[in-house]
Amino acid sequence: MASEQAKPVPSSAVLALGDRSEAGLKGQSRPGEAVIQAVLMACGLVSVLTTVGIIVVLFSQTILFFQSRAWLAARQPVAQEVSLATTANSIDAAATELSISYSDETRVFQANQNIQVGDEIMTVVDRPRGRLVVQRAQFGTEAFDHPAGTEIFPMADLAARTVDVMTEDDLDVTVSEGFGGLFSIGQEIKLGPEVMRVVDIDGDVLAVERAIDSLPAPHGANSTVEVEDRPSLVEFFTSTVWQPISGQFGIIPLVTATMLTSLVAMCVAVPLGMSTAIYLAEYATPRVKGTIKPILEILAGVPTVVYGFFALTFITPSLRTLFFGDNINFTNMLAAGLAMGILITPLISSMCEDAISAVPRALREASYGLGATKLETTIQVVLPAAVSGISAALIIGLSRAVGETMIVALASGAGPNFTFNLLASAETMTGHIARISSGDLSYGSIDYVSIFAVGATLFVITFGLNVLSGYIASRLRERY
Amino acid sequence: MSNLVDVGVYRSDVIRRNTRARWMQNIYFSTLIIAIIVLLLLLFSIINQTFGYVAISQEIKAEQLSDRPLAELQPTELATILLEQTPRLLLVMVRDNLSAVPVDQFTSTPLRDGINGTVPDDLADLTPRDLSGDTGPAAYARLLGDNLSSAQLVALIEVNVLKVEIEQSWTLVESLTQREEIEASVAATEDQEDLVFYSWLNNRLLTQRNSQRVEEAGIGPALAGTFYLLIMTVAISLPLGVGAAIYLEEYAQESFLNRLLETNIRNLAGVPSIIYGMLGLTVFVNTLSFITQGRSILSGALTLSLLILPIIITNSREALRAVPSTIREASYGLGATKWQTVSRQILPAALPGVLTGLILGVSRAIGETAPLIVIGATNSISTFPDSPFSRFSVLPFTIYNWSSQPDAAFKNASSAAIIVLLVLLLIINSAAIFFRNRAISKRV
């Protein structure tokens, strides 16, 4: 055969073949085929467009969020008329604790409340019996020594209001007494629908330029003066309060709730999933495998909203009767995390099983040959060899837990809450997006764009985890 | 001698190590048991909520209306009962159950056009406004008697005449174990309540519309919405997914673009579903609202299609790859073009695998709730979806909505809806297994 092929082909034959191919096969152009190929490629490109779409949508709306202007009443704490308590002993300027005697028996101070003692404003940090732990010298006041018996006035946040009626032509806004200090020259303020710019401040009288990008209008006395509140990146990542109504957008409470529920889920899913995977890959007979794998597949296929229902109507009541009694909230992070753990167990176990099964038999047999038991072989030889696949599986499981929505939306609680107490209810990032968007959102409102800022954060976290998982799987893999 | 001692140490060590190995094996095995227990608990908790005693209060007993059970009466007799008991409500009942036109036009449209069903000739030209006098109720009673089934009329009587209300519900376990206490507590109530063993999974649940009152609430439109949505999702995602898979398997060369496509599909599979919802909200609901009419089934189907595309592409690629290359080469050898080879040889051979992938995608889509919440599925609609542009509700959304209601009875209704959803999933997955087995037996 080889020698026949090696024979030189007569040139006439080449010529004949060449002619035929030109006439019959090669010469035809097939526009139809090219069109079909282009259409198929376009189908493939849809997925790229999806990714591009997700990134563009999330980040463009997030930028809109950080550019959005919200107007909030300019507020400052004002001492109220009636004092609630007096200091029981004299305090010096450095002390952070006051002993107090109440004018009546009720405990009236709250954490974070501002109080006025003499000329000094303090913030209550804690209130153990008979004492107040405070932060001294707040709101630009100075710390003084106070004698025993000084009255303590509670303070309330009051909004700045106008004192006089304004016509379309007035250029002075007089605000409530003592509120002038809230404003600065060049700042924009809003009265009703009209935006103005402060050009000069004299005590509580603001000289303004009227009708900035709006129409001049008359304003009644006692209208609220609003100032602009633009969400800032720093506030977004450092504030522990998420309260769109009062213009506070700090994502930390949403992130901590997400992390806590995911952590609980991982605490359930990692031992369960890995142990199931080890059993299925190393010990199980084909028959056991044939029974268990469908069960895991069913667990993986149950819609997540059903797990949410399960957490809400079974796990929480069970935790309540078995362990925690009334300490556990009706919606709580623990139950949501447990249900999520059940959800991701099949995912982790099937990925880990693939990783363990991929370890070559030779490694196991060498280990047995050295006298190791099955357990020692599994723990000391097989698992280290499969570590890349296993860690990739765990990270994918975590990413899935972070992005899971329905369980936490149902069982973890509605309302952001900065807490590390698993028995308390707190809203996760996904839960927040789901709750806010299930109301009728008006397109472009600050609530609408704020969920995109949360979504972008969520996307960055899960995308980072997925990329990390892929990186670990490909880079740490031992090649056999 | 020293050798012997060593052997002794070695032996005791082996026993210890083997014991430990056996212990750990048991622990590994116990996790499987835990998985089974969890699945059983899940099913138990759902069934536990679906059946059980309910305490029902009613203002009038059925016996006071008729000496025979209501279910045995003819529609006309039931309509007469409605006419006697609630003459003022008949107009609303006709409008809610039979109207063929929007609510605001109903009173001014002749009954011939305004009613969905048969209308007696003497009423055909009249509008509800003409019938506002004393003759109205009798006419409406005739319309109801002619056009509604006995079951629907009984339901109307229960709600409007008997004023049936579910006061309290018990789980199956409670109903079985604490029967006496439940009976005692019901007997102790002031307004005479009846204790009935109730299945929340019933005909009314499956067919009726959603309602604020749990006695009337059903999943009819939600079920229809789920089917509508799934059919459209399949229609959109199947060609796109299979097309992309064919391109990647049969046409694509090793190039930057194709590596990008592959990485991209892998990463898309890991994006949380709620993010797809936000994409759909911005692109389909808001930007393309002139095509999709906003929060419509079409927007939902487009969003879900993007969500399940990675699943369909990955599975279709595997199916295409499993087609032996001899088939391709034989086809090329006979002079077929690439597309002829793909469409007439490879696709038919890979079809079972492609369908399996499709079904896996669909069973993912059917339980998906989060993106549809963002897109704007709503529970407040009372009509069945009639076009791709109508607003919609889906089954999992109803489950979510009912589960988060404060009224405990809604949790029972919710668990009944969950059973419907799980049965749907079971049917779809059985189909997947059927196709998979057929594909395997064919190959052998």
Image (tube, coloured by chain):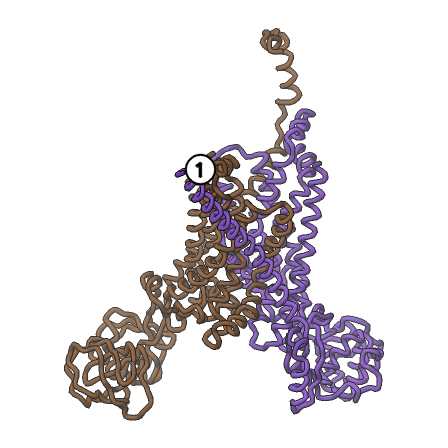
Front residue of this view, candidates A291 and B264:
A291
Along the line of sight, the residue nearer the viewer: B195 or B12: B12
Residue A296 visible in image: yes
Foreground residue, A104 or A223? A104
How would you rate the neighbour count of disc 1 (Cα within 10 Å): few for under 14, some for 14-19, many for 20 or more? Answer: few
Location of residue B73 (image quadrant): bottom right
Q: Who's the residue at 19% across and 83% down the image?
A: A119
Tell me residue A263's x, y (percent): 44, 60
**Viewer-closest of B139 and B420:** B420
SS at mark 1 in the image:
loop
Q: Is residue A376 above or below residue B393?
A: above
Residue indicated by mark 1: A478
- Which chain does the purple colour mark? B
Residue B284 located left or right of residue B395 = left
User: Looking at the picture, does residue B349 appear above or below residue A175?
Assistant: above
Q: The chain shown in brown is which?
A: A
Which percent across, then down, holds residue A124? 28, 79
In terms of image quadrants, where is residue A38? Answer: top right
What chain is tagged by disc 1? A
Among the 4 quarters of the image, the one containing residue B83: bottom right
